Image: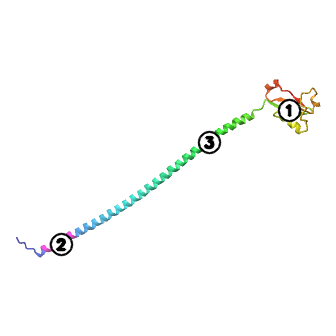
Amino acid sequence: MIRIVTAARLAGLHTDLAAADGRIRSLLDALNEQWASNLCSVLELEEDRDDADRAALEATEAADGLRQQVERMRQAFAVALLVLVRQQHRIGELEQQLAAARTPPPWLYLLRRHGEPHSLHPSQKAAKEHATACGAPRTGWGPSDLPPAEITWRVEAVAVVPEQEQRAPRSDAA
């Protein structure tokens, strides 16, 4: 069968072809725009992912740094706590020594000169040494029946604890 194409038909086909070509071009333009938009979105997503990866890496490094800092602080705290415990122990020892040092001796020794109090000493030996330094003789110390005012140097034991007065040590005179 032979079909005769008329000029009007041919013009209509050209018009249809031009319209189809225009629609194809507009679809291709729309597709290009959509492709470009999608490509931009993909690139933005890749940039966001890279930023997120960098932020995650920085956060991990910061967390590692904080863990190390916390560990150093924990060690420093343990050392400081150990020092405090040792210092408290030492303070306890010193307090005990101080309490022992504050405990008065049961006796003190009063050095008299011509019956008047001259000085107080922790031991009879210390009192005699002091009297010797003040001009008393080194020998001749002993009990005397003379009145206290007539004895130049004399050492008397003085009870610090009242219970000790009943057991008084002897007095020495020079």
For label 2, the residue is 15
Q: Is any part of residue 139 visible from this angle? A: yes
Seen from the viewer's position, the closer of residues 143 and 19 is: 143
Image quarter hosting the N terminus: bottom left
Between the residue at mark 2 and the residue at mark 1, the CA separation in whole angstroms equals: 143 Å
Dominant secondary-structure state across the stretch colored magenta: helix
Location of residue 47 in the rendering, given as x and y in whole percent from the top left corner = 39, 61
Residue 12 shown in magenta = yes
Amino acid found under the numbered disc labelled 3: Leu
Q: Which residues are magenta?
A: 9-21
> Marks 1 and 3, how far apart in space?
45 Å
How many angstroms separate mark 3 from mark 2 (CA)? 100 Å
List the single residue furthest toward the left: 1
Residue indicated by mark 1: 110
Q: Are marks 1 and 3 in contact (CB under 8 Å)?
A: no
- Name the mark nearer the viewer: 2 or 1: 1
Which residue is rendered at x = 53% and y = 50% of the image?
69
Residue type pointed to by label 2: Thr
